Amino acid sequence: MKTDSLFFRIFKTFPSAFFDLIDETDPRTATYAFTSQEVKQTAFRIDGIFMPPPRLRQFPIYFVEAQAYREEANFYYRFFGEIHLYLRDYQPAHPWQAVVIFTEKRFDPELPECYSEYQNNPRLQRIYLNRLPQELGERTLGLALLQLLVTKQKQAPAKGRALIERSRQELTDVTIQRNLIELIEIVFVYKFPELNFQEIGNMLGLGDLKQTRAYREAQEDILEKTVPLLLQNGMTVEQIAQHYNFPIETIRQFVQPEAK
Protein backbone atom coordinates (compact mmCIF):
# COMPACT_ATOMS: atom_id res chain seq x y z
CA MET A 1 0.00 0.00 0.00
CA LYS A 2 1.80 3.11 -1.24
CA THR A 3 0.37 6.17 0.43
CA ASP A 4 1.39 9.20 -1.63
CA SER A 5 4.65 10.51 -0.18
CA LEU A 6 3.32 14.03 0.37
CA PHE A 7 0.31 12.80 2.35
CA PHE A 8 2.60 10.47 4.28
CA ARG A 9 4.72 13.46 5.34
CA ILE A 10 1.65 15.40 6.42
CA PHE A 11 0.07 12.60 8.46
CA LYS A 12 3.38 11.54 10.00
CA THR A 13 4.14 15.09 11.15
CA PHE A 14 0.61 16.34 11.78
CA PRO A 15 -1.61 13.27 12.45
CA SER A 16 -4.52 15.33 13.75
CA ALA A 17 -5.08 16.47 10.14
CA PHE A 18 -6.34 12.96 9.30
CA PHE A 19 -8.88 12.89 12.11
CA ASP A 20 -10.01 16.41 11.21
CA LEU A 21 -10.58 15.15 7.67
CA ILE A 22 -12.76 12.19 8.68
CA ASP A 23 -14.57 14.34 11.27
CA GLU A 24 -13.50 12.20 14.23
CA THR A 25 -13.47 14.46 17.28
CA ASP A 26 -12.85 11.99 20.11
CA PRO A 27 -9.80 13.34 21.99
CA ARG A 28 -8.50 9.81 22.43
CA THR A 29 -7.49 9.78 18.77
CA ALA A 30 -4.40 11.65 19.97
CA THR A 31 -3.14 8.26 21.20
CA TYR A 32 -3.10 6.78 17.68
CA ALA A 33 0.25 6.08 16.02
CA PHE A 34 0.73 6.59 12.28
CA THR A 35 2.95 3.77 11.15
CA SER A 36 4.09 1.36 8.45
CA GLN A 37 3.86 -2.40 8.72
CA GLU A 38 5.52 -5.22 6.82
CA VAL A 39 3.15 -7.92 5.63
CA LYS A 40 4.66 -11.31 6.41
CA GLN A 41 5.98 -13.49 3.58
CA THR A 42 5.35 -10.79 0.99
CA ALA A 43 7.46 -8.13 -0.67
CA PHE A 44 5.46 -5.08 0.35
CA ARG A 45 4.91 -2.75 3.26
CA ILE A 46 1.65 -1.05 4.18
CA ASP A 47 2.63 2.58 4.61
CA GLY A 48 -0.51 4.26 5.91
CA ILE A 49 -1.91 2.75 9.12
CA PHE A 50 -3.37 4.66 12.05
CA MET A 51 -3.06 2.21 14.92
CA PRO A 52 -4.95 2.69 18.20
CA PRO A 53 -3.32 1.65 21.48
CA PRO A 54 -4.14 -1.93 22.59
CA ARG A 55 -6.29 -0.72 25.52
CA LEU A 56 -8.79 0.96 23.15
CA ARG A 57 -10.10 -2.23 21.55
CA GLN A 58 -13.32 -0.62 20.39
CA PHE A 59 -11.38 1.92 18.30
CA PRO A 60 -10.73 0.94 14.68
CA ILE A 61 -7.49 0.51 12.82
CA TYR A 62 -7.52 2.96 9.90
CA PHE A 63 -5.95 1.80 6.64
CA VAL A 64 -5.24 4.99 4.70
CA GLU A 65 -4.38 5.36 1.03
CA ALA A 66 -3.91 8.60 -0.90
CA GLN A 67 -4.27 8.86 -4.66
CA ALA A 68 -3.02 12.32 -5.42
CA TYR A 69 -2.60 13.05 -9.13
CA ARG A 70 -3.16 9.83 -11.04
CA GLU A 71 -5.74 7.13 -11.63
CA GLU A 72 -4.79 3.53 -10.87
CA ALA A 73 -7.18 1.18 -12.66
CA ASN A 74 -6.60 -1.79 -10.33
CA PHE A 75 -6.50 0.33 -7.19
CA TYR A 76 -9.33 -1.29 -5.22
CA TYR A 77 -8.15 -4.83 -5.98
CA ARG A 78 -4.72 -3.96 -4.61
CA PHE A 79 -6.01 -1.91 -1.68
CA PHE A 80 -8.44 -4.49 -0.29
CA GLY A 81 -6.09 -7.35 -1.13
CA GLU A 82 -3.34 -5.84 1.01
CA ILE A 83 -5.73 -5.04 3.85
CA HIS A 84 -6.98 -8.62 3.99
CA LEU A 85 -3.45 -10.01 3.86
CA TYR A 86 -2.63 -7.79 6.84
CA LEU A 87 -5.72 -9.02 8.72
CA ARG A 88 -4.82 -12.63 7.98
CA ASP A 89 -1.23 -12.23 9.15
CA TYR A 90 -1.75 -10.12 12.28
CA GLN A 91 -5.32 -11.04 13.30
CA PRO A 92 -5.85 -7.76 15.18
CA ALA A 93 -8.40 -7.48 17.98
CA HIS A 94 -9.56 -4.07 16.74
CA PRO A 95 -12.23 -3.39 14.12
CA TRP A 96 -10.99 -1.71 10.96
CA GLN A 97 -11.93 0.97 8.47
CA ALA A 98 -10.49 1.92 5.10
CA VAL A 99 -10.06 5.58 4.11
CA VAL A 100 -9.11 6.63 0.59
CA ILE A 101 -8.20 10.25 -0.09
CA PHE A 102 -8.37 11.52 -3.67
CA THR A 103 -7.36 15.03 -4.65
CA GLU A 104 -10.14 14.91 -7.27
CA LYS A 105 -13.01 12.51 -7.94
CA ARG A 106 -11.75 11.88 -11.49
CA PHE A 107 -8.87 9.87 -10.02
CA ASP A 108 -11.31 7.41 -8.39
CA PRO A 109 -11.62 4.35 -10.69
CA GLU A 110 -14.88 3.40 -8.90
CA LEU A 111 -15.56 0.20 -7.01
CA PRO A 112 -15.48 -3.03 -9.03
CA GLU A 113 -18.63 -5.15 -8.87
CA CYS A 114 -16.97 -7.70 -6.59
CA TYR A 115 -16.54 -4.98 -3.93
CA SER A 116 -20.00 -3.45 -4.37
CA GLU A 117 -20.91 -4.27 -0.75
CA TYR A 118 -18.56 -1.45 0.28
CA GLN A 119 -20.67 1.09 -1.60
CA ASN A 120 -22.33 3.33 1.02
CA ASN A 121 -20.72 1.16 3.69
CA PRO A 122 -19.06 2.88 6.69
CA ARG A 123 -16.23 0.35 6.38
CA LEU A 124 -14.97 2.38 3.40
CA GLN A 125 -14.76 6.17 3.39
CA ARG A 126 -13.78 7.99 0.19
CA ILE A 127 -12.83 11.65 0.41
CA TYR A 128 -12.38 14.06 -2.52
CA LEU A 129 -10.38 17.07 -1.39
CA ASN A 130 -11.52 19.34 -4.22
CA ARG A 131 -15.15 18.80 -3.17
CA LEU A 132 -14.71 19.82 0.46
CA PRO A 133 -16.44 23.10 1.35
CA GLN A 134 -13.95 25.97 1.37
CA GLU A 135 -15.09 27.08 4.82
CA LEU A 136 -14.03 23.70 6.22
CA GLY A 137 -10.43 24.91 6.24
CA GLU A 138 -11.38 27.56 8.76
CA ARG A 139 -12.06 24.89 11.40
CA THR A 140 -8.51 23.62 11.84
CA LEU A 141 -5.02 24.21 10.50
CA GLY A 142 -4.84 20.57 9.42
CA LEU A 143 -7.86 20.88 7.15
CA ALA A 144 -6.54 24.15 5.73
CA LEU A 145 -3.24 22.42 4.92
CA LEU A 146 -4.99 19.55 3.12
CA GLN A 147 -7.13 21.99 1.14
CA LEU A 148 -3.96 23.79 0.09
CA LEU A 149 -3.04 20.65 -1.88
CA VAL A 150 -5.91 21.26 -4.30
CA THR A 151 -5.86 25.06 -4.34
CA LYS A 152 -5.35 26.40 -7.86
CA GLN A 153 -1.90 27.84 -8.56
CA LYS A 154 -3.28 31.34 -9.01
CA GLN A 155 -4.79 31.41 -5.52
CA ALA A 156 -2.12 29.31 -3.80
CA PRO A 157 0.45 32.03 -2.91
CA ALA A 158 -2.07 34.14 -0.98
CA LYS A 159 -3.54 31.04 0.68
CA GLY A 160 -0.08 29.81 1.64
CA ARG A 161 1.00 33.12 3.16
CA ALA A 162 -2.28 33.39 5.06
CA LEU A 163 -1.87 29.86 6.44
CA ILE A 164 1.68 30.61 7.58
CA GLU A 165 0.49 33.75 9.37
CA ARG A 166 -2.42 31.84 10.89
CA SER A 167 -0.09 29.12 12.19
CA ARG A 168 2.07 31.75 13.87
CA GLN A 169 -0.98 33.18 15.60
CA GLU A 170 -2.68 29.93 16.63
CA LEU A 171 0.24 27.65 17.52
CA THR A 172 2.08 28.50 20.72
CA ASP A 173 4.41 25.49 20.52
CA VAL A 174 7.34 26.70 18.41
CA THR A 175 8.26 23.18 17.26
CA ILE A 176 4.74 22.37 16.03
CA GLN A 177 4.57 25.78 14.36
CA ARG A 178 7.86 25.18 12.54
CA ASN A 179 6.76 21.68 11.48
CA LEU A 180 3.53 23.02 9.98
CA ILE A 181 5.33 25.79 8.09
CA GLU A 182 7.75 23.19 6.71
CA LEU A 183 4.80 21.15 5.46
CA ILE A 184 3.44 24.24 3.71
CA GLU A 185 6.85 24.71 2.10
CA ILE A 186 6.86 21.11 0.88
CA VAL A 187 3.34 21.46 -0.57
CA PHE A 188 4.53 24.46 -2.59
CA VAL A 189 7.66 22.67 -3.80
CA TYR A 190 5.39 19.94 -5.20
CA LYS A 191 2.78 22.39 -6.49
CA PHE A 192 5.27 24.61 -8.36
CA PRO A 193 7.93 22.23 -9.76
CA GLU A 194 8.78 24.74 -12.51
CA LEU A 195 10.00 27.30 -9.95
CA ASN A 196 13.33 27.19 -8.18
CA PHE A 197 13.48 27.08 -4.41
CA GLN A 198 14.34 30.73 -3.95
CA GLU A 199 11.33 31.76 -6.05
CA ILE A 200 9.03 29.56 -3.97
CA GLY A 201 10.49 30.90 -0.73
CA ASN A 202 9.98 34.47 -1.90
CA MET A 203 6.41 33.61 -2.90
CA LEU A 204 5.72 32.54 0.68
CA GLY A 205 7.73 35.34 2.27
CA LEU A 206 10.21 32.85 3.72
CA GLY A 207 13.41 33.47 1.75
CA ASP A 208 15.43 30.78 -0.04
CA LEU A 209 14.05 27.30 0.74
CA LYS A 210 17.47 25.78 0.07
CA GLN A 211 18.33 26.79 3.62
CA THR A 212 15.38 24.91 5.16
CA ARG A 213 14.90 21.33 6.30
CA ALA A 214 11.79 21.10 4.10
CA TYR A 215 13.95 21.66 1.03
CA ARG A 216 16.45 18.99 2.05
CA GLU A 217 13.69 16.43 2.69
CA ALA A 218 11.80 17.15 -0.54
CA GLN A 219 14.79 17.63 -2.85
CA GLU A 220 15.20 14.05 -4.02
CA ASP A 221 11.48 13.47 -4.63
CA ILE A 222 11.12 16.72 -6.56
CA LEU A 223 14.16 16.23 -8.78
CA GLU A 224 13.21 12.62 -9.49
CA LYS A 225 9.82 13.78 -10.80
CA THR A 226 10.73 17.04 -12.52
CA VAL A 227 14.07 16.36 -14.24
CA PRO A 228 12.65 13.80 -16.74
CA LEU A 229 9.71 16.13 -17.49
CA LEU A 230 11.96 19.13 -18.08
CA LEU A 231 14.18 17.06 -20.36
CA GLN A 232 11.11 15.98 -22.36
CA ASN A 233 10.16 19.65 -22.68
CA GLY A 234 13.48 20.39 -24.34
CA MET A 235 15.64 21.65 -21.49
CA THR A 236 19.21 20.37 -21.23
CA VAL A 237 20.87 19.04 -18.10
CA GLU A 238 22.91 22.24 -17.93
CA GLN A 239 19.80 24.43 -18.16
CA ILE A 240 18.04 22.44 -15.44
CA ALA A 241 21.09 22.72 -13.18
CA GLN A 242 21.13 26.48 -13.71
CA HIS A 243 17.37 26.73 -13.13
CA TYR A 244 17.54 24.96 -9.77
CA ASN A 245 21.00 26.29 -8.92
CA PHE A 246 22.41 22.77 -8.48
CA PRO A 247 25.67 21.23 -9.66
CA ILE A 248 25.30 19.47 -13.01
CA GLU A 249 26.32 16.15 -11.45
CA THR A 250 23.44 16.39 -8.97
CA ILE A 251 20.97 16.73 -11.85
CA ARG A 252 22.59 13.85 -13.78
CA GLN A 253 21.67 11.50 -10.92
CA PHE A 254 18.01 11.90 -11.89
CA VAL A 255 18.42 11.50 -15.66
CA GLN A 256 17.00 8.25 -16.99
CA PRO A 257 19.66 6.13 -18.77
CA GLU A 258 18.21 6.54 -22.28
CA ALA A 259 18.19 10.34 -21.86
CA LYS A 260 21.83 10.74 -20.81
Image: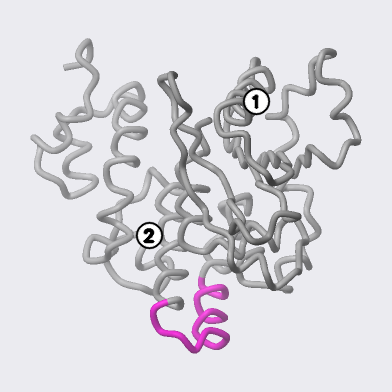
**Residue at image mark 2:** 200
Of 57 and 107, the residue lying toward us: 57
Quadrant of the image occupied by residue 136: bottom right
Q: Residue 152: x and y, percent?
A: 62, 51
Number of marks:
2
Magenta span dominant secondary structure:
helix
- Residue 123 in percent (x, y) is at 81, 39
Tell me if residue 162 is in the magenta stretch.
yes
- Which sits in the foreground, 214 or 22? 22
Q: In the image, what residue occupies the spot 72% across and 47% down?
A: 130
Q: Nearer the viewer, residue 40 or 209?
A: 40
**Rounded to the nearest whole Å, what is the CA distance between mark 2 and mark 1?**
42 Å
| Image quadrant where residue 23 sits | bottom right
Q: Which mark is residue 41?
A: none
Query: Would residue 55 be found to the left or right of residue 105 on screen?
Result: left
Mark 2 or mark 1, which is nearer to you? 1
* Range of residues picked out in magenta: 161-175
Q: Which residue is mark 1?
A: 84
Q: Compared to 248, does 75 lie above or below?
A: above
In the image: residue 216, left or right of residue 8: left
Please, what is the three-letter code of the amino acid marked with disc 2?
Ile
| Disc on the earlier residue, 2 or 1 | 1
Quadrant assignment, res 220: top left
Label 2: which secondary element: helix
**In terms of depth relative to the viewer, which is nearer, 226 or 23?**
23
